[in-house]
Amino acid sequence: IVTDVLSCGDSKLPPHALPPFQCCPQTPASDTRVTNFTFPDPAEPLRRRRPAHDASAAEDMAKYERAVALMKALPESDPRSFYQQSRIHCAYCTGAYRQAGSPELPVQIHFSWLFFPFHRAYVYFFERVAAKLLGDPGFTVPFWSWDVPEGMRIPPAFADEASPLYDPIRNPRHAPPRVVDLDYSHADKNYTDEQHIQLNLRTMYKQMITNAPLPSLFHGQPYRAGDRQRPGVGTVEQRPHNTLHVWTGDISQPNHENMGTYYSAARDPIFYLHHPNSDRLWMVWLELDLDLDDDSDRPRHSDFTDPDWLDSSFLFYDEDARLVRVTVRDMLDMGRLRYTYAEVDMPWLKARP
Ligand code: C2O
């Protein structure tokens, strides 16, 4: 799947969507050239993203708050503004982009093998834009570690009405200290916190191990040029990723805005902490073989090697507001992208249902 700079047009928003209704990124000037992605300088220090719940991330959280305030203060036409950043997501999941060569076919990066690489690239550019605005090249986004018991709540900074991280369009009943339900389906369960935590750990085990032995099961099904959208969702995309979107959104809004529906999800600043955690789980899934010794005949976890996956490409604005084309292939080596994740304990590894 290749996205073309000229192919962004009308999006299909759900009924009763909240404004703004236009999702395409700022139209590039006619002389804008799309540059191909280049890797950061290998001498650049490795950024280590930290878990939001942990004291080690306190400084990153404060910086993130400042970065969001700076992005919200930019003119809406600036591709680095919070407004434009949130529209990237809207464009890539409402059919605003069409497949290069097949204008009748919308591009939808969810429910397919594009889910992990697209969101990796998204957070990569978002983080670098934030770092540039902060004047702090080492800045890293914290991750909302909802797979770890200590992280199974919305980080408290997001619930402070005076903070730029606050979003009034969330489910008020799920404000912290409410424990998340990774298995949520539109109704709150009558569980104690401890019961929720145990259920969450088992959900993690199922989605990361039991149900995800193959790349097509973990990542999602192949989606090639000429294919219809949504060929099949991957385990972690479906839950906890999707379930947490809906759990966070406001159930009294027509489409569970903001987080609970694609077009508006990235309007909530928690989106940019939710995605690094899914991204981290991609890394964890690839490394799992080393940690598990229960089923010796389990296939080794590995990514696709299919060129249709590797050559799929997306468009982003970088920290200098240049339009960049990035391929899935570009997104596979976190070391070359100069970031990694702090290690956290993962008790779900022992939560075999
Ligand atoms: Cu693009 Cu969390 O969805």
Image: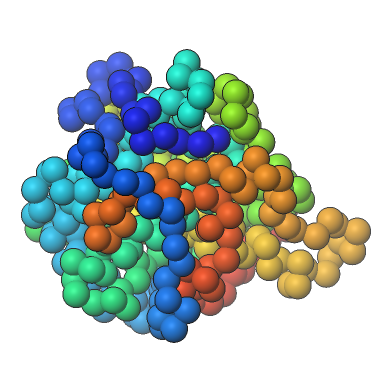
Q: Answer above or below: position of 247 versus 103.
A: below
Residue placed most toward the observer, 134 or 196: 134
Residue lying farthest to the front in this orientation: 31
Residue lying farthest to the right in this orientation: 297
Quadrant position of residue 255: top left
Left or right: where 166 falls relative to 227: left
Residue displayed at 59% across by 29% down = 225
In this view of the protein, can residue 104 be seen by the observer?
yes
Q: Answer above or below: position of 351 versus 131.
A: above
Residue displayed at 40% across by 80% down = 44
In this view of the protein, can residue 217 be seen by the observer?
no
Quadrant position of residue 187: top left
Left or right: where 49 falls relative to 2: left
Q: Quick one: quadrant of the N terminus?
A: top right
Residue 51 at what x, y percent from top left?
42, 71
Residue 265 at what x, y percent from top left?
33, 40
Residue 352 at what x, y percent from top left?
73, 58
- Marker count (numbered): 0
Q: Answer above or below: position of 261 versus 43.
A: above
Residue 263 at what x, y percent from top left?
33, 32
Residue placed most toward the observer, 56 or 276: 276
Q: Answer above or below: position of 51 versus 107.
A: below
Residue displayed at 76% across by 67% down = 289
Residue placed most toward the observer, 51 or 226: 226
Residue placed most toward the observer, 133 or 20: 133
Residue displayed at 36% across by 36% down = 5
Q: How is the image coloured?
A: rainbow
Quadrant position of residue 179: bottom left
Left or right: where 302 falls relative to 199: right
